[in-house]
Amino acid sequence: RIIQSEKVPHRRFNKFSWDAYYDVNDIHKYVYDVSKSFSEWTEIIEAGESYEGRKILGLRINTRYETEQRETGKPVFFIESGIHAREWIGPAVTTYFINQLLTSRDPNVTRLRDQFDWRIFPTVNPDGYHYSYTVDRYWRKTRSRSLNGCRGADPNRNWDYNWGQYSSSTNPCDYQLYAGSRPFSEAETRSLSKYISTIDNLLFYVAFHSYASLLLVPYSDSLEHVDNYDELVQIGKKSIEYGSRMNSDLYDGPDTAAATLYKTSGGSMDWVRHALHTRLVYTYELRGSSFHWPAERISEQGDEVTLMMMGLADGAQELGYF
Ligand code: 0X9
Ligand code: ZN
């Protein structure tokens, strides 16, 4: 019953909203639709295809309004969500955030919109998400087929940085943590990493997961601190503080996954930090006490995330990152 009530009632199948969870085709349709409605500000990004041939679909939002005078383009702010199939709140708040950026008249939001060249990918594991939506609600991995017939690898264990070291399984039949047959064995992580590598001026990389109300910084498999750790924490604290205007129950962190959760290797954020030297990299474990966040309350976390992104931007600007 819980599971049914998460999904879109049939009578409303043709209108996208934020009081139900949609399947990946509908999310993609939403992205294509808004790129048409806001064609002067947006561009579709097709960063490759999943194992089953779905698009790794993103939206670029880059208004021509400048908040600063600058010689090069705006700093790029990248958002990845839905890498874990069952964490449905991620894609939902991400499309909510897209909608905020494109339609809000709140001057704080329009300023945030204009400050960055946004690259936003709501469902980077589209096959897994569809499988979770239609067959097995708790599916986490991709849907690639291994030699022995088992399906899927954990796409947040498959990136080419310290691959296979911690919280990773070598068993393709492991329901959660199979790291894949080699780094970037999965079409989804291969395509996405390739696309990210082409971005000049990447300042922020943010990934949404659930659930823990926790903010993480790199690296996930070491207790050592990156060189700008103190600033990452300071900016992350501002993000949490902004979010607390929506919900006074504070997020934990920011700190490394190794210090707060458990050591993990092969995650996207660590690869981005290490391979691309991106300065401001964060993983948000969104709120919840299960993978079922009530659909009627998506907007609540959507507003909180909008504030938290504003906190990141303000924090980074104060410290001179852009
Ligand atoms: O284990 C994970 O991949 C994340 N937790 S989850 O419960 N959503 O599966 C934590 C990831 C933290 N590490 C990196 N992002 N590398
Ligand atoms: Zn996750």
Image (cartoon, helix red, strand yellow):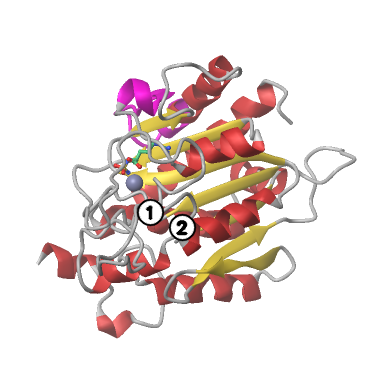
Q: Is residue 176 above or below residue 37?
A: above
Residue under numbered circle 2: 185
Q: Residue at x 70, y 71 (%)?
A: 39
Q: Quadrant of residue 128?
A: bottom left
The alpha-carbon separation of the residues under discs 2 and 1 comes to: 6 Å
Mark 1 crowdedness (10 Å alpha carbons): few <14, some 14-19, many ≥20: many
Residue 187 % position (x, y): 49, 64
Q: Assess whether mark 1 and mark 2 are in contact (beta carbons under 8 angstroms).
A: yes
> From where the camera sits, is residue 122 visible?
no
Q: Which residues are magenta?
A: 241-260
Q: Specify the label residue 32 is tagged with.
A: none
Check disc 2 and report its element: helix, strand or loop.
loop
Mark 2 crowdedness (10 Å alpha carbons): few <14, some 14-19, many ≥20: some
Q: Residue at x 41, y 58 (%)?
A: 91
Determine whether, in the image, residue 25 is placed left or right of residue 31.
left
Disc 1 marks a residue whose amino acid type is Gly
Q: Quadrant of residue 248?
A: top left
> From where the camera sits, is residue 38 visible?
yes
Q: Residue furthest left?
A: 1
Check disc 1 and report its element: helix, strand or loop.
loop
Residue 170 % position (x, y): 29, 47
Residue 62 % position (x, y): 72, 56
Q: Quadrant of the N terminus?
A: bottom left
Residue under numbered circle 1: 180
